[in-house]
Image (cartoon, helix red, strand yellow):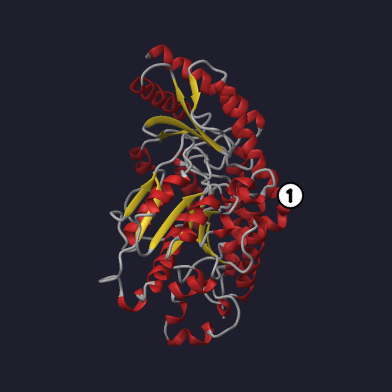
Amino acid sequence: MSHHFKDYRPLLERSLEHATAYLESLGERPVDKETTSQQLRELIGGDLPSGASEPGKVIDDMVNALDAGLVASGGPRFFGYAIGGTFPASLAADWLVSAWDQNVPYYVSSPAMAVAEETAAEWMIDLLGLTQGSAVGFTSGAQEAIYTSLITARNSLLANADWDVATKGLYGAPRINVVVSDQIHSTIKRALSMIGLGVECIKKVPTDSNLRLIPSELNRVLSDCNGPTLVCAQAGCIDSGAFDPFDEIADAVAAHENAWLHVDGAIGLWAAASDSQKHLLKGIERADSIDTDGHKWFNMPYDCGMVIVKDPSKITSAMGGSNMGDYLNDAMEKPDRNAINFGIAASRRARGLPVYAAFKSLGKEGIVAHLDNCVTLAKRMADKLAQVEGVTILNDVVSNRFSAQFGIGDDEYRNELTDRVVHRLQQEGFLYPSTSGYKGLKTMLFSVLNYHTSEQDIDQSAEKIIQAYKAELALM
């Protein structure tokens, strides 16, 4: 029998050369090359090939064509949105995930990956100080983790109201109240619209000047919520990094006759690992479900997210892994971990392996050092900018991000100037912040999540920001 497995080696070696050349350039290459979509179509597109091409040439041509449109978001000076880099061991493990090509919904389809993900899940719960025995599922990101959490919450809340949504569907079901802060992330609203709850059921709770939910306002809103009620809080607000007061929120939820507490921890949950930061998350272990991203602050390669549900029976019931068909009965009857019980995906890659590699390579001390360094660097940048006349830091910097505005004048003037400063910086390419909003104001969002960012990167970037501000100020 003829096999061609040796054909992989030269291609993988060539890809290794391209990959390492790219990674080693991240400290110097422009963050964004400002290439137009039409230029990229001319480089990448064309007619469907009618015949085969030599694979090595395909790899080389592909790299050369795509390079112009790559954003150096894994580099040390990408400060926009909420995008991290990659820990070296996790990237290497992710390559092995592709090479091993294991399908991981069932223990029997890959015992090794099942146990690796099980171990990573247990270590994660231990690292973050959450309830032992909580269920952990590995997802494509926080969005999928939110879908999974809110589906689980929906089913549990309706079961408490004597309604089996898996059997009866949602037609005629009791209405679920959804209570969120006025800083609700779009992923929550997107999930609500896709799981049949809709966005009309949302009741918003005001936040303070740092964008933290106000507990007294939550109590007021909840007093008008009769029947099943879903409460969503945040660990790490996108625009301020703020953490909602979880103990007080959990007290309010516990006092309700039928409520579920979900925490969106996409950005900030990992702070629970740090002795200097975990006070910000006091009480989060009382949440019924939590979502987070691996590919943000925890520096996993894309894609990686996690869903955590305190009562495993709730998520396994909601995900319906035991209803997959007779041909899978034997697989489901095995006593070991079947990942399909902890998420909405059936076939998927072993996303938990890069997480396992990070825990093994860095240990708790290395992970905490990374988390604390990001906070220190965010505060360093905020302190430098705050010394410049006309630059306003809008929030207390408690975590890895802050929002800033530029200029002295009315809101319209400052909004325009801020927008111009951010876009100038993006076009120059040395660093990449992004624009956002803060209680109606246009802002520069500055986020430090990358394992490779240094004090030098912060100091040089601060100089560039100040120069851009002064240049745009002179043009206003």
Horizontal side of 300 relative to 33 (left or right) equals right
Residue 251 at least partly seen? yes
Q: Residue furthest left?
A: 172
**Image height of 468 relative to 217, above or below:** above
Residue 295 at least partly seen? no
Q: Which residue is mark 1?
A: 365
- The three-letter amino acid code for the residue at tag 1 is Glu
Q: Residue furthest top?
A: 474
**Image height of 249 relative to 229, above or below:** above
Horizontal side of 364 relative to 188 (left or right) equals right
Q: Position of residue 386 (x, y in %)?
A: 55, 22
Q: Position of residue 34 (x, y in %)?
A: 42, 33
- The one nearer the camera, 394 or 147, is 394
Image point (60%, 82%), residue name: 335
Quadrant location of the N terminus in the rendered image: bottom right
- The one nearer the camera, 432 or 275, is 275
Image point (40%, 70%), residue name: 155
Tell me which corner region of the image, top left, top right, bottom left or bottom right, holds residue 450.
top right
- The one nearer the camera, 16 or 426, is 426
Q: Position of residue 408 (x, y in %)?
A: 42, 16
Horizontal side of 419 relative to 78 (left or right) equals left
**Image height of 362 relative to 476, above or below:** below
Quadrant location of the C terminus in the rendered image: top left
Mark 1 residue crowding within 10 angstroms, few (<14) / some (14–19) / many (20+)? few
